[in-house]
Structure formats: structure tokens, C-alpha cells
Image (cartoon, rainbow, N blue to C red):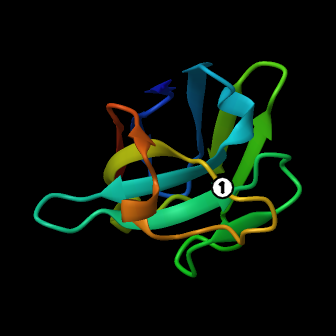
Amino acid sequence: QVQLVESGGGLVQAGGSLRLSCAASGRAASMYDMGWFRQAPGQERDFVAAVSRSGGSTSYADSVKGRFTISRDNAKNTVYLQMNSLKPEDTAIYYCAAHLAVVGERLTERADEYRYWGQGTQVTVSS
């Protein structure tokens, strides 16, 4: 069992920055690949970024490449999402999720392969 708690959301103007944090607790939290997803009203939950359990591999949605950076600090059991050059279309609830990966498995972008989820944090970007 892994518990995830997101923080750092808020209201920001277009072009601004936010850093989201996801604190993980529970059994062997550092053994999980971690992902960020987002869901806007009336839309499906979309993949944003993922990081391997070691932090050595990352993956990004095309819409955020070059603007967002995912990272993790296993000593603190925390995953971060640095979001720069924010756009109004980035407005959504952002969720942190954990995937228990098999050794050698590539990072997954499929929400249904992430077992544990946080409660979400709202990000609103004004134009």
C-alpha cells in the first residue's frame, strides 16, 4: 500500500511557473515508477510525465515537452513536477500516481497501469 499526497497547485498567470510535489508514504515507495496525470473538466485523465524508480529515465507528453520537468528525491520519498511557461490549456486537476514496475520495463503512460493515486491538486492558469 502506498499513499500519495499532492501539493503546490494554485492560480498563476500565463507564462508563469509552479512546482507540484507528491509525497509518498508506505511500503517501499521508492520501488515505484511515478507519474503525473491531469484532468480538465469534462475530459479524460491524460498522461503528463513519468519518472523511473531510480530517477534515471523520464517520459513526457508532447504537449509539455520543453516546459515541464519531472524529478524525484527518493531520500524524501517525493516526486516533483516543475511547470514553466504555463498556458491556459494546462488548467486541470493534477494527479500523482505510482506504478510497480517490473525490472527492465519501460515507463508507462497508461493511467490504468498505475495502481495508487493521490487526491489531486488544482492548477489554474489565467490568460
Left or right, 66 with respect to 21, comes to: right
Drawn side of residue 108 relative to residue 56, left or right: left
Total numbered badges shown on the rendered structure = 1
- Asked if 37 appears above or below 23 in the picture, the reply is below
Residue at label 1? 101
Asked whether, in this view, residue 8 is left or right of residue 75, the answer is left
Q: Secondary structure at mark 1?
A: loop
Can you tell which quarter of the image residue 39 is in? bottom left
Report the residue at 52% width, 70% height from top.
109
Q: In front here: 100 or 89? A: 100
Q: Position of residue 24 (x, y in %)?
A: 59, 24
Q: Residues within 10 Å of mark 1 (few under 14, many from 20)?
A: some
Identified at 24% across, 59% down, the residue is 40
Residue farthest along the left direction in this orientation: 42
Placement of 120 over or under 46, stated as above or below: above
Which quadrant: the C terminus?
bottom left
Q: Residue furthest front?
A: 102
Image quadrant of residue 107?
bottom right
Where's residue 93, x and y in %?
A: 31, 46
Place of residue 65 in the rendered image (x, y in percent of width and height, measured from the top left): 66, 74
Amino acid type of the residue that numbered disc 1 sits on in the rendered structure: Ala
Residue 69 placed where, x, y %? Answer: 71, 55
Between 119 and 27, the one lying in front of the other is 27
Q: Residue at x 63, y 70 (%)?
A: 60
Q: Residue at x 43, y 39 (%)?
A: 116
| Residue 116 sits above or below residue 85 on the image | above
